[in-house]
Amino acid sequence: MKIEELIVEAKKAREKAYVPYSQFKVGAALLTKDGKVYHGCNIENAAYSVTNCAERTALFKAYSDGVKDFTAIAVVADTERPVPPCGACRQVIAELCPSDLKVYLTNLKGDIQELTVAELLPGAFTAEDLHGK
Ligand SMILES: O=c1ccn([C@H]2C[C@H](O)[C@@H](CO)O2)c(=O)[nH]1
Ligand SMILES: [Zn+2]
Protein backbone atom coordinates (compact mmCIF):
# COMPACT_ATOMS: atom_id res chain seq x y z
CA MET A 1 0.00 0.00 0.00
CA LYS A 2 1.24 3.49 -0.87
CA ILE A 3 1.68 6.07 1.86
CA GLU A 4 -0.92 8.30 0.21
CA GLU A 5 -3.44 5.45 0.54
CA LEU A 6 -2.57 4.91 4.20
CA ILE A 7 -3.14 8.63 4.82
CA VAL A 8 -6.58 8.37 3.16
CA GLU A 9 -7.33 5.55 5.64
CA ALA A 10 -6.21 7.76 8.54
CA LYS A 11 -8.63 10.46 7.33
CA LYS A 12 -11.46 7.90 7.26
CA ALA A 13 -10.56 6.87 10.81
CA ARG A 14 -10.59 10.53 11.87
CA GLU A 15 -14.23 10.84 10.87
CA LYS A 16 -15.13 8.31 13.59
CA ALA A 17 -13.56 10.42 16.37
CA TYR A 18 -15.70 10.91 19.49
CA VAL A 19 -14.71 14.41 20.57
CA PRO A 20 -17.61 16.20 22.31
CA TYR A 21 -15.18 18.15 24.55
CA SER A 22 -12.31 19.27 22.32
CA GLN A 23 -13.96 18.98 18.87
CA PHE A 24 -10.42 18.02 17.79
CA LYS A 25 -10.64 14.96 15.58
CA VAL A 26 -7.60 12.75 15.09
CA GLY A 27 -7.28 9.66 12.91
CA ALA A 28 -4.63 6.97 12.71
CA ALA A 29 -4.09 4.14 10.24
CA LEU A 30 -1.80 1.28 11.20
CA LEU A 31 -0.55 -0.90 8.34
CA THR A 32 0.16 -4.53 9.22
CA LYS A 33 2.74 -6.79 7.55
CA ASP A 34 -0.18 -8.68 5.98
CA GLY A 35 -1.43 -5.50 4.32
CA LYS A 36 -4.40 -5.00 6.64
CA VAL A 37 -5.17 -1.54 7.99
CA TYR A 38 -6.33 -0.85 11.54
CA HIS A 39 -8.19 2.43 12.02
CA GLY A 40 -7.92 4.39 15.24
CA CYS A 41 -9.67 7.57 16.37
CA ASN A 42 -9.57 9.58 19.56
CA ILE A 43 -12.32 8.74 22.04
CA GLU A 44 -12.91 11.34 24.75
CA ASN A 45 -14.64 11.11 28.10
CA ALA A 46 -16.35 13.47 30.53
CA ALA A 47 -13.54 12.47 32.89
CA TYR A 48 -11.05 14.02 30.49
CA SER A 49 -7.95 12.10 31.53
CA VAL A 50 -9.27 8.73 30.40
CA THR A 51 -9.46 9.89 26.79
CA ASN A 52 -7.77 7.53 24.36
CA CYS A 53 -5.82 9.01 21.47
CA ALA A 54 -6.16 7.85 17.88
CA GLU A 55 -2.69 6.30 17.76
CA ARG A 56 -3.21 4.19 20.87
CA THR A 57 -6.69 3.14 19.74
CA ALA A 58 -5.26 1.74 16.49
CA LEU A 59 -2.42 -0.07 18.24
CA PHE A 60 -4.62 -1.50 20.97
CA LYS A 61 -7.16 -2.73 18.41
CA ALA A 62 -4.43 -4.57 16.51
CA TYR A 63 -2.82 -6.02 19.63
CA SER A 64 -6.13 -7.20 21.00
CA ASP A 65 -6.62 -9.09 17.73
CA GLY A 66 -3.22 -10.72 18.24
CA VAL A 67 -1.67 -8.69 15.42
CA LYS A 68 1.79 -7.36 16.29
CA ASP A 69 3.70 -6.91 13.05
CA PHE A 70 3.39 -3.51 11.43
CA THR A 71 5.07 -1.66 8.59
CA ALA A 72 3.84 1.92 9.07
CA ILE A 73 1.48 4.21 10.95
CA ALA A 74 -0.08 7.42 9.65
CA VAL A 75 -1.72 10.08 11.83
CA VAL A 76 -3.83 13.01 10.70
CA ALA A 77 -5.54 16.02 12.26
CA ASP A 78 -6.58 19.51 11.17
CA THR A 79 -3.39 21.17 12.40
CA GLU A 80 -1.03 23.82 11.05
CA ARG A 81 1.94 21.47 11.21
CA PRO A 82 1.82 17.68 10.84
CA VAL A 83 0.08 16.54 14.03
CA PRO A 84 2.56 15.68 16.80
CA PRO A 85 1.57 12.63 18.89
CA CYS A 86 1.37 13.22 22.64
CA GLY A 87 3.94 11.82 25.03
CA ALA A 88 1.75 8.90 26.12
CA CYS A 89 1.31 7.76 22.51
CA ARG A 90 5.04 8.11 21.82
CA GLN A 91 5.75 5.85 24.78
CA VAL A 92 3.18 3.24 23.69
CA ILE A 93 4.37 3.32 20.07
CA ALA A 94 7.98 2.89 21.29
CA GLU A 95 6.91 -0.17 23.28
CA LEU A 96 4.76 -1.91 20.66
CA CYS A 97 6.50 -1.02 17.38
CA PRO A 98 10.01 -1.65 16.11
CA SER A 99 12.33 1.35 16.37
CA ASP A 100 12.71 1.55 12.58
CA LEU A 101 8.96 1.55 11.84
CA LYS A 102 7.94 4.49 9.65
CA VAL A 103 5.66 7.10 11.20
CA TYR A 104 3.85 9.57 8.94
CA LEU A 105 2.57 12.66 10.71
CA THR A 106 0.19 14.62 8.49
CA ASN A 107 -2.49 17.27 8.41
CA LEU A 108 -5.51 18.06 6.24
CA LYS A 109 -3.47 20.54 4.19
CA GLY A 110 -1.36 17.65 2.92
CA ASP A 111 1.86 18.27 4.83
CA ILE A 112 3.70 15.02 5.60
CA GLN A 113 6.49 14.54 8.13
CA GLU A 114 8.15 11.13 7.89
CA LEU A 115 10.11 9.83 10.83
CA THR A 116 10.95 6.60 12.61
CA VAL A 117 9.75 5.38 15.98
CA ALA A 118 13.27 5.97 17.34
CA GLU A 119 13.07 9.60 16.24
CA LEU A 120 9.61 9.97 17.76
CA LEU A 121 10.87 9.27 21.28
CA PRO A 122 14.64 9.40 21.67
CA GLY A 123 15.77 7.87 24.95
CA ALA A 124 12.49 6.06 25.56
CA PHE A 125 12.18 4.16 28.83
CA THR A 126 12.13 0.48 27.81
CA ALA A 127 11.90 -3.06 29.16
CA GLU A 128 15.72 -3.16 29.17
CA ASP A 129 15.78 -0.28 31.66
CA LEU A 130 13.25 -2.09 33.81
CA HIS A 131 14.95 -5.47 33.86
CA GLY A 132 18.55 -4.70 32.89
CA LYS A 133 21.32 -4.81 35.45
O1 LIG B 1 -1.67 13.02 18.36
C1 LIG B 1 -2.71 13.24 18.99
C2 LIG B 1 -2.95 14.42 19.72
C3 LIG B 1 -4.15 14.57 20.37
N1 LIG B 1 -5.10 13.59 20.31
C4 LIG B 1 -6.43 13.80 20.92
C5 LIG B 1 -6.59 13.65 22.39
C6 LIG B 1 -7.81 14.51 22.65
O2 LIG B 1 -9.00 13.79 22.35
C7 LIG B 1 -7.69 15.63 21.64
C8 LIG B 1 -7.13 16.90 22.19
O3 LIG B 1 -5.93 16.68 22.86
O4 LIG B 1 -6.85 15.11 20.61
C9 LIG B 1 -4.89 12.42 19.60
O5 LIG B 1 -5.76 11.56 19.51
N2 LIG B 1 -3.68 12.27 19.01
ZN1 LIG C 1 -1.70 10.57 22.34
Image (spheres, rainbow, N blue to C red):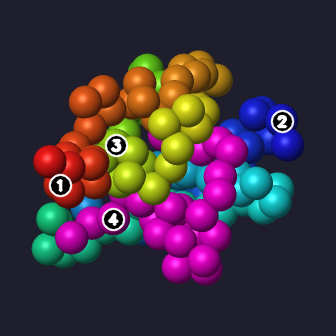
Residue at the front extreme, as displayed: 133
| Mark 4 residue element | loop
- The mark lying in front, picked from 3 and 1, is 1
- The mark lying in front, picked from 2 and 3, is 3
- The mark nearer the N terminus, 4 or 3, is 4
Q: Which residue is mark 3?
A: 90
Q: Residue at x 38, y 52 (%)?
A: 95
| Number of marks in the rendered image | 4
- The mark nearer the N terminus, 2 or 4, is 2
Q: Position of residue 86 (x, y in %)?
A: 29, 42
Q: Position of residue 36 (x, y in %)?
A: 78, 61
Q: Is residue 57 magenta?
A: yes
Which range is magenta?
50-77
Q: Which residue is mark 2?
A: 2
Q: Report if the beta carbon of the residue with label 4 is closer than 8 angstroms to ligand 1.
A: yes
Q: Is residue 126 visible?
A: yes
Residue type of the residue flagged with mark 1: Leu
Residue 80 lies in what quarter of the image?
top left
Residue type of the residue flagged with mark 4: Asn
Q: Which residue is mark 1?
A: 130
The reply to whether callout 2 and callout 4 are in contact (CB within 8 Å) is: no
Residue type of the residue flagged with mark 3: Arg
